[in-house]
Image (cartoon, rainbow, N blue to C red):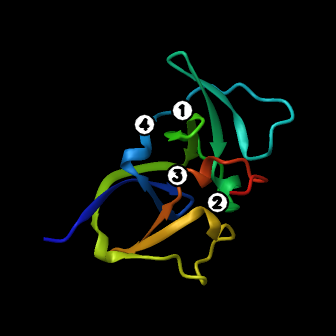
Amino acid sequence: MAQTKQYCTFYIGRQYFGLDVLKVQEVVRHQPLTPVPLAPPTVRGLINLRGQIVTAIDAHRRLELPRAGEHEEAVNVVVQGEDGAYSLQVDEIGDVLEVGLDQFEPPPVTLPLKRLDLIQGVYKLSDRLLVILDPQRIVEPPDSTV
């Protein structure tokens, strides 16, 4: 029996992404944002999640992906980082997907993304690629180096 792993999946534009389900605290529909003066462009603002202040990160800007159009309301994928919770704002949520570890591949250098350093790898599914994001790197400030 092959080993498997579960991912919380979502769309950013037309691309299909996933995060390790064990790193995702919860998925929350649109929340009011409080802007943060002088914040990096990737930070959309702060949200109040039942008394917990969470930094909201724009996934399009973080991954340097163009917007196909303005989505009505972003979905917040709340990720547990080393310094607390962060919200990754995505266009649409998918499902929790279980995939075999034998399908995992490192990110190909030809992957059409500018930020390959934020990607752990890909899974070749029957109808598309599932791009797995690094849950710690995706919420780091863009000028941060690890």
Check disc 1 and report its element: helix, strand or loop. Answer: loop
> Residue 47 at x, y = what percent?
61, 26
Q: Earlier in the sequence, mark 4 or mark 1?
A: 4
Pointer 2 residue? 68
Q: Amino acid at mark 3?
A: Pro
Work out which residue is located at the far right of the displayed protein and give it. 38
Q: Amino acid at mark 1?
A: His
Mark 4 Cα-neighbour bin, 10 Å: few <14, some 14–19, many ≥20: some
Pointer 1 residue? 30
Work out which residue is located at the far top of the displayed protein and give it. 51
Q: Earlier in the sequence, mark 1 or mark 2?
A: 1
Pointer 4 residue? 25
**Occupied quadrant, residue 64:** bottom right
| Residue drawn where x is 71% and y is 38% of the image | 44
**Occupied quadrant, residue 68:** bottom right
Marks 4/1 in contact by CB < 8 Å: the verdict is no
Q: Which mark is residue 135?
A: 3
- Disc tally is 4
Q: Is residue 38 above or below residue 101?
A: above
Q: Earlier in the sequence, mark 3 or mark 2?
A: 2
> Residue 59 at x, y = what percent?
62, 51
